Amino acid sequence: MTLSPEQALEQAALAGIHRLRIPTPFAVGRVNCYLIEDEPLTLVDTGPNSGKALDELGAQLAARGHSIDDLELVIVTHQHIDHLGLVEIVAEHSGAEVAALGLAADRLANFDEDAEAEDRFAVELMLRNGIPEEVTAALRSVSRSFRGWGSHVAVTKPLADGEELPFRDRTLRVLHRPGHSPSDTVFWDERRKILIAADHLLANISSNPLISRPLDGSSERSQALVTYIESLRETRAMPAEIVLPGHGEPVVDHVTLIDERLAKHERRKEKIYALIDEQPRTGYELAQAIWGNVAVTQAFLTLSEVIGHADLLVNEGRVREVEDGPVVRYEANGT
Ligand SMILES: [Zn+2]
């Protein structure tokens, strides 16, 4: 029997997992953090680095009879600032251990340099895919202005894919599910069939497979959507009853939702193929053909989306990348 989202939250609460909804300044709205009332007393994600988020985190913990100082473990689900900006402050106040995917620990520790490198990478990728220079410059300043909501994070408890995280009343299995970001990590309570999934799977919006530098620091770009689809298939195969996401309501039927997401990507891929088949186009031209002129803040997002689908087509042998001076165009291979 499928639960309603409200029942799923109640069920999670009975299992000692409580959703805290922390405000962010971003379009996505509030971020879901999860308090696990167990030993150690654990917070999964913290929200962004702002006084408002800190106040609300304190108030929502107090409503459950805890304070920030009581926290013993903070888990970081992935590298995005709406999820981790407060981690350092919380860890400083409480002395809590900080757990995150070990592969991401260096990047989290060097937040400022990493954010700069990520921006340089994004600008290069945008220029190569035909996005005008003024758009990339505008986007870069937007990114800089957001950076204050992030922070470096010192990981004291590096986690490995597949490892078990033991608590007094439960065990969570750590699973690396990259795609939305390279460091996406989900936490699986097999006994209760509850998956804490952060942004890997969201009920109301599809998780953007944002193109990002690989965790090993190499400059080669990863195929974010290809990776994401592989990760989704792994999650689809799990017997989860409740998926607790990083934004919005719980997912109560993850198989149906994942099938919808996969079908949507399949449709979009064919749409992009048709556009490429019509005439060779850059990633920017493809994004414009689909969405028109989007807001500057959406430019990297839509480009990530287009490149992701073009990657699928390149891997299938239906499309190739052709260098044209400083830009690259996608061309159909013909049948
Ligand atoms: Zn995210």
Image (cartoon, rainbow, N blue to C red):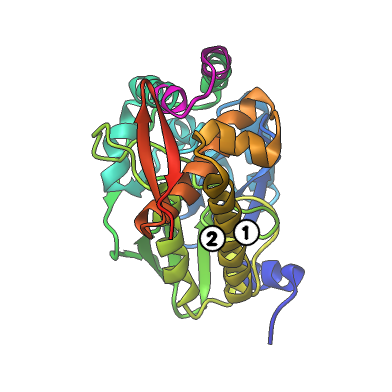
Residue 154 visible in this rendered orientation of the protein: yes
Q: Which mark is residue 18?
A: 1
Which residue is disc 2 drawn over?
Answer: 37
Q: Is residue 275 above or below residue 140?
A: below
Residue toward you, 52 or 180: 180
Q: Quadrant of residue 269?
A: bottom right
Q: Which mark is residue 290?
A: none
Q: Nearer the viewer, mark 1 or mark 2?
A: 1
Q: Which image quarter is the N terminus in?
A: bottom right
Identified by mark 1, the residue type is: His
**Residue 116 left/right relative to 291:** left
Q: Residue furthest front?
A: 335
Residue toward you, 303 or 77: 303
Q: Is residue 284 above or below residue 278?
A: above
Residue 75 visible in this rendered orientation of the protein: no
Q: Residue at x 59, y 29 (%)?
A: 299
Q: Quadrant of residue 316?
A: bottom left
**Residue 260 left/right relative to 91:** right
